[in-house]
Image (tube, helix red, strand yellow):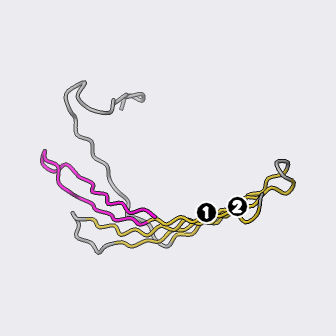
Amino acid sequence: MAYSLRDDKTPLNGELFQSEKSENVRAKLATTISDNHNLTVVLNYRVFNDLLTGDDAVESITGRIDWTGDIIKHVFRSELNYSVANARVPKREYVFVEVPTGEGTHTWRDDNLD
């Protein structure tokens, strides 16, 4: 089981302000059914807040079930995956702030000259 808290910042008028916050809880269960069959279940619960717009929090639940098995040990392998989700996070717009050359973490390559 894991818990994480994420804070995103957005530049406004040359300063960074906290714009989004999300809390995530993840649970994972993995078990071996027999010598050659495995089952894994992963569940995620997320609460996402867009602090700039003031919209209501978006809650989402996602899950995944994975089954793997060998029909003849180490000869034929079978896998089954099932995923489900109930919500999407609203589309985000990314804004990049130009910094002096050599001081940033990314490099801009204008391959199409736009």
Question: Residue 88: where, in percent of width, then height?
Answer: 44, 67
Q: What residue type is labelled 2?
A: Asn
Question: Residue 8: where, in percent of width, then height?
Answer: 27, 54
Dot 1 or dot 2, earlier in sequence: 1
Alpha carbon separation for disc pair 1 and 2: 7 Å
Label 2: which secondary element = strand
Image point (27%, 60%), residue name: 20
Q: Is 86 or 24 nearer to us in this picture? A: 24
Q: Is 55 or 85 nearer to us in this picture? A: 85
**Residue 38 circle label:** 2
Q: Label 1: which residue?
A: 30
Left or right position of 100 against 22? left
Question: Residue 41: where, in percent of width, then height?
Answer: 59, 66
Q: Is 65 or 31 nearer to us in this picture? A: 31
Residue 65 among those drawn in magenta: no
Image point (32%, 53%), residue name: 93
Q: Which span of residues is magenta-colored? A: 1-25
